[in-house]
Image: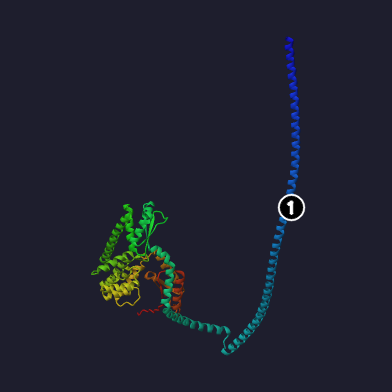
């Protein structure tokens, strides 16, 4: 039984060995088959890759050939176009060369003609010089004088004649120029106004209001611009709000409207409540305040000048001059100055100071009207004074203050003088004292630079210059020429308002003492 078991075990062991061996052989065959299949597949892949590479290579070669052919065609087309352009340029160059050749030929021909004519002209000049020399010799024989002596005699005679002729000519031309003076002056004035209109408008038609801070600009504008529209509608001014820090600008030709808007706006800013209802209330209050100010300023002018019995409407119109300026000078203060100056002169001369003061105070009353009323301030003032039954002497004084008409009374002359003195006072019309002094010095330097001048004086605030010449060096005919030359030099070298009168004075005196 034991041997049977051993035999069974040995049988099982032999069976397992055989089975294991058979499994190994089977796996070996399967592996060999797999390896062979993989090798075959690899060979196939290699062969397919070779075929694909050949195919890609052929396709690349064909594509490169196509690209080369395409570029070749494009190059040939560009070459043809450029060749045509070069041919056109060459043709144009050839045409221009032909034109240049033709012009060169014409220039050469003209130069030859010029040379020929120059030779002919030189020959004629030589013949003329010879003829002139022969004539001079004949004249010398006839006059028994040498050529130099004859020249000196003729030049001396000619110089004397020319002085008189030049002086006469200048006098005649000055007389003729007076007829054209008004027309020329208007043209110059219009040109000057045109040049300075922009700067003057910007300076004379705006009022600047300072703000505590920029946040108020939005409140002044209001929701959807209601506040600013209300202000502009009620005051008739333009409100300019831009990027300028802490500033808004009021723009209008009417200074009284600007003043009303300024007062109302400043009060609104101080109050802090800015809405259409409050704006309307403040503007009404500002109008009342400005009307009171106008009346007070008119009464102040009457008080300072001593003028009485004036119609209330004239008092209000005088007060409006507080808000008018002329070249930066306040018109109301200017009128008060003119009235006081004219009145003082009238007292010194034994004339009627009442008429002089009244005419001086009202001489610019026409400037109180707005720009929409047509007429000069003189014509408007005449109508106004006639309307309120002022005396003729007062109207005449106002009418002649700019020299538009001849003064009919001595008081009218005093109003003219007062107007000139007040306007020409240093600093009155935006001219500093230093500038004023330099202008007078420049005037005298120009006058002193002329030969024969003994002394020169700039008078009437630079509106007139008087030149005293040495009588032994400058004759009567020469002073006319000197006056003209000085005036021309002043015009060319200086800038000044109005006009400057040049007076050249020549005086001879003989003094002897009887002992």
Position in image of residue 249 (x %, y %): 38, 58
Query: Could you tell me which quadrant the N terminus lies in?
Result: top right
**146 vs 107: above or below:** below
Residue closest to the far bottom: 142
Q: Nearer the viewer, residue 480 or 32?
A: 32
Residue closest to the far left: 309
Q: Residue at x 73, y 55 (%)?
A: 69
Q: Nearer the viewer, residue 39 or 199?
A: 39
Position in image of residue 346 (x %, y %): 28, 72
Q: How is the image coloured?
A: rainbow
Q: Residue at x 26, y 68 (%)?
A: 313
**79 vs 451: above or below:** above
Q: Nearer the viewer, residue 291 or 21?
A: 21
Q: Nearer the viewer, residue 184 or 166?
A: 184
Position in image of residue 303 (x %, y %): 25, 65
Label tally = 1
Does residue 432 show up? no
Q: Quadrant of residue 441?
A: bottom left
Q: What residue does disc 1 label?
A: 65
Q: Quadrant of residue 81?
A: bottom right
Numbered disc 1: secondary structure: helix
């Amino acid at each position: 039984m034991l041997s049977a078991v051993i035999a069974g075990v040995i049988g099982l062991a032999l069976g397992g060995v055989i089975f294991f061996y058979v499994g190994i052989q089977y796996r070996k065959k399967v592996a060999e088959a797999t390896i062979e299949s993989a090798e075959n597949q690899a060979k196939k892949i290699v062969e397919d890759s070779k075929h694909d590479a050949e195919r890609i290579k052929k396709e690349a070669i064909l594509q490169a050939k196509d690209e080369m052919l395409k570029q070749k065609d494009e190059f040939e087309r560009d070459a043809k176009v450029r060749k045509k352009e070069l041919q056109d340029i060459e043709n144009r160059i050839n045409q221009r060369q032909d034109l240049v050749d033709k012009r060169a030929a014409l220039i050469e021909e003209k130069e030859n003609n010029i040379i020929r004519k120059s030779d002919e002209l030189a020959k004629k000049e030589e013949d003329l010089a010879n003829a002139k020399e022969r004539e001079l010799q004949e004249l010398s024989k006839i006059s028994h004088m040498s050529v130099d002596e004859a020249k000196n005699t003729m030049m001396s005679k000619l110089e004397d004649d020319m002085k008189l002729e030049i002086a006469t000519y200048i006098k005649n031309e000055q007389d003729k120029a007076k007829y054209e003076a008004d027309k020329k002056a208007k043209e110059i004035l219009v040109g000057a106004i045109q040049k300075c209109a922009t700067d003057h408008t910007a300076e004379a038609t705006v009022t600047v209001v300072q703000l505590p801070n920029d946040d108020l600009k939005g409140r002044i504008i209001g929701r959807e611009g209601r506040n600013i529209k209300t202000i502009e509608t009620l005051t008739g001014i333009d409100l300019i709000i831009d990027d300028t820090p802490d500033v808004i600008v009021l723009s209008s030709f009417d200074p009284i409207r600007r003043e009303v808007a300024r007062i109302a706006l400043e009060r609104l800013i101080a109050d802090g409540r800015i809405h259409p209802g409050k704006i309307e209330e403040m503007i009404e209050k500002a109008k009342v305040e400005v009307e009171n100010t106008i009346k007070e300023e008119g009464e102040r002018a009457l008080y300072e000048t001593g003028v009485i019995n004036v119609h209330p409407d004239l008092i209000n119109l005088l007060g409006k001059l507080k808000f008018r300026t002329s070249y930066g000078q306040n018109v109301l203060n200017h009128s008060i100055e003119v009235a006081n100056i004219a009145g003082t002169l009238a007292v010194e001369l034994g004339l009627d100071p009442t008429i002089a003061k009244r005419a001086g105070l009202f001489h610019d009353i026409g400037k109180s009207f707005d720009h929409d009323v047509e007429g000069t301030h003189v014509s408007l003032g005449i109508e106004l004074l006639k309307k309120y039954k002022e005396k003729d002497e007062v109207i005449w004084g106002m009418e002649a203050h700019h020299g538009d008409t001849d003064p009919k009374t001595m008081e009218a002359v005093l109003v003219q003088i007062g107007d000139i003195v007040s306007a020409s006072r240093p600093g009155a019309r935006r001219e500093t004292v230093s500038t004023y002094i330099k202008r007078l010095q420049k005037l005298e330097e120009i006058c002193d630079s002329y030969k024969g001048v003994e002394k020169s004086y700039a008078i009437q605030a630079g509106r007139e210059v008087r030149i005293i010449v040495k009588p032994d060096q400058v004759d009567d005919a020469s002073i006319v020429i000197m006056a003209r030359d000085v005036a021309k030099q002043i015009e060319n070298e200086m800038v000044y308002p109005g006009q400057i009168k040049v007076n050249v004075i020549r005086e001879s005196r003989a003094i002897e003492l009887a002992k």
